[in-house]
Image (cartoon, rainbow, N blue to C red):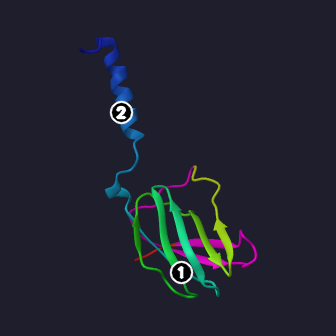
């Protein structure tokens, strides 16, 4: 059944709006991420909670880099957790509202620890790899 002629422009506009609001495709949003431990502490069980799922990077010694792992959509600030000297530590962004999605490519999250006794003492900065 065809829509009445007077509704067709509205339906076309609604279809375009729906397409524009779709998520970025996997091919456009593929990110290879790794972790650098820039602290003096061993980071145990490092896990990054990306929008499309959790990625476990495991244990990372001071000054070391993890292997790269592929994910889909990623942001500059992600929810990251690790254990330092038996203390669970978290970096938790409030949300990603207004944050741009990272462009396709390779990135390193550089982790530092301000204090192993502070659960919020885990911090990260992001660097795009060449």
Residue 16 has which mark? 2
Instruction: Name the residue at 64% across, 66% down.
Output: 91
Q: Nearer the viewer, mark 1 or mark 2?
A: 1
Q: Residues within 10 Å of mark 1 (few under 14, many from 20)?
A: some
Q: Residues within 10 Å of mark 2 (few under 14, many from 20)?
A: few
Picture coordinates of residue 75, whole percent (x, y): 51, 60
Instruction: Name the residue at 72% across, 70% down.
Output: 119
Instruction: Name the residue at 71% across, 68% down.
Output: 120
Picture coordinates of residue 79, whole percent (x, y): 58, 62
Of residues 69 and 129, which is closer to you in this image?
69
Of residues 53 and 92, which is closer to you in this image?
53
In the displayed structure, 75 sits above or below 20; it is below
- Mark 1 vs 2, N-terminal side: 2
Q: Residue furthest front?
A: 86
Inspect the magenta stretch and tell me whether residue 96 lies in it.
Answer: no
Direction from residue 94 to residue 4 in the image, left or right: left
Residue to which mark 1 is pinned:
59
The magenta stretch is 98-126
- Describe the element under mark 2 as helix, strand or loop: helix
Image quadrant in which the N terminus is located: top left
Instruction: Name the residue at 39% across, 42% down.
Output: 22
């Amino acid at each position: 059944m065809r829509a009445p002629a007077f509704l067709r422009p509205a339906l076309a506009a609604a279809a375009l709006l729906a397409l524009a609001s779709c998520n970025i495709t996997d091919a456009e949003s593929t990110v290879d991420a790794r972790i650098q431990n820039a602290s003096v502490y061993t980071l145990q069980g490092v896990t990054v909670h990306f929008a499309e799922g959790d990625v476990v990077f495991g244990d990372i010694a001071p000054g070391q880099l993890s292997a790269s792992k592929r994910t889909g959509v990623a942001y500059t600030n992600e929810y990251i957790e690790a254990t330092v000297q038996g203390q669970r530590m978290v970096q938790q962004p409030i949300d990603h509202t207004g944050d741009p999605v990272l462009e396709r490519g390779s990135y390193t999250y550089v982790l530092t620890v301000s204090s192993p006794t502070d659960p919020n003492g885990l911090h990260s900065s992001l660097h795009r790899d060449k």
